Amino acid sequence: MWTRRFDVPVFVENEANAAALGEYYFGIAHNVQNLIYLSAGVGLGGGIIIKGRLFRGSSGYAGEVGHMTVDPNGELCGCGKRGCWETVVGPRAIVRRVKKALESGAESQIGTLVENDLSRIDVGVVVQAAQAGDLVAQTALEQVGVQLGIGIGNLVNTFNPEMVVLGGALSLAGPFLLPVVEETVREHALEQPRKILEIAASAHGEEACVMGAVALVVDEILREPSF
């Protein structure tokens, strides 16, 4: 419909897949042949690149790593199921941990940063507080980092990637998450696939998907020169 309306090719793609391509062509994972990109926004998605090509699965739904079940009795996920990985590692999980700590009376400067309006807490605020030494913020990020590392360890054992890229809101918290994630992955991933692994924050942060939109066109031209 859009192609007919504008008389130009139109590309439609999952944002995590697009962002993975953006990092592959223009970012931290430039020309890394086997990588997994984790996109944290409203939830947690994944883009998987195998031998330099985006892996979409048999019907286009590959990469929904945020919906791996990690706790059948856990929090209700936006997908309608319980205990999905994104319920313990996504941006909402970070905010939820912070709010719980504040509501239990923990001392934190986060309340001041949001003028005591807890609905204004987001990952950016948590990272700002953590940078200033706030223990509530740092603890929440550390706890999420452990859960993130456990899941990444499973992905490493499954796909044996060269690189895992933390994108979206997770990239904002990279300095706090990466050390914990790396330590946890060392504990849970098999030794051989772990040896070649690099875990990095996205070069483009929350803009990786924009770069991915460009990358979709570049990828099509390179793979279909007659396009």
Image (cartoon, helix red, strand yellow):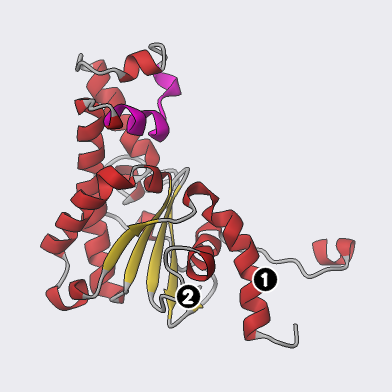
Give the side of residue 93 with respect to residue 50, left or right: left
* Residue bearing mark 2: 55
Main SS type for the magenta part? helix
Q: Amino acid at mark 1?
A: Val
* Secondary structure state at the residue bearing disc 2: loop
Give the side of residue 148 with respect to residue 36, left or right: left
Choose top left, top right, bottom left or bottom right for residue 93.
top left
- Indicate the position of residue 90 as horizontal and vertical percent values: 36, 44
Residue at point 60%, 68% (across, down): 215
- Indicate the position of residue 12 as horizontal and vertical percent values: 66, 63
Is 164 rendered above or below residue 112? below
Residue at point 26%, 24% (across, down): 100
Give the side of residue 175 with respect to residue 33, left or right: left
Q: Which span of residues is magenta-colored?
A: 118-130
Q: Is residue 10 visible?
A: yes
**Of residues 72 and 57, the one drawn nearer to the viewer in this rendering:** 57
Choose top left, top right, bottom left or bottom right for residue 122.
top left
Where residue 174 is drawn, which disc sits there? none
Give the side of residue 125 with respect to residue 8, left or right: left
Q: Amino acid at mark 2?
A: Phe
* Residue bearing mark 1: 217
Q: Is residue 71 visible?
A: no
Residue at point 48%, 75% (across, down): 55
Residue at point 20%, 51% (across, down): 179
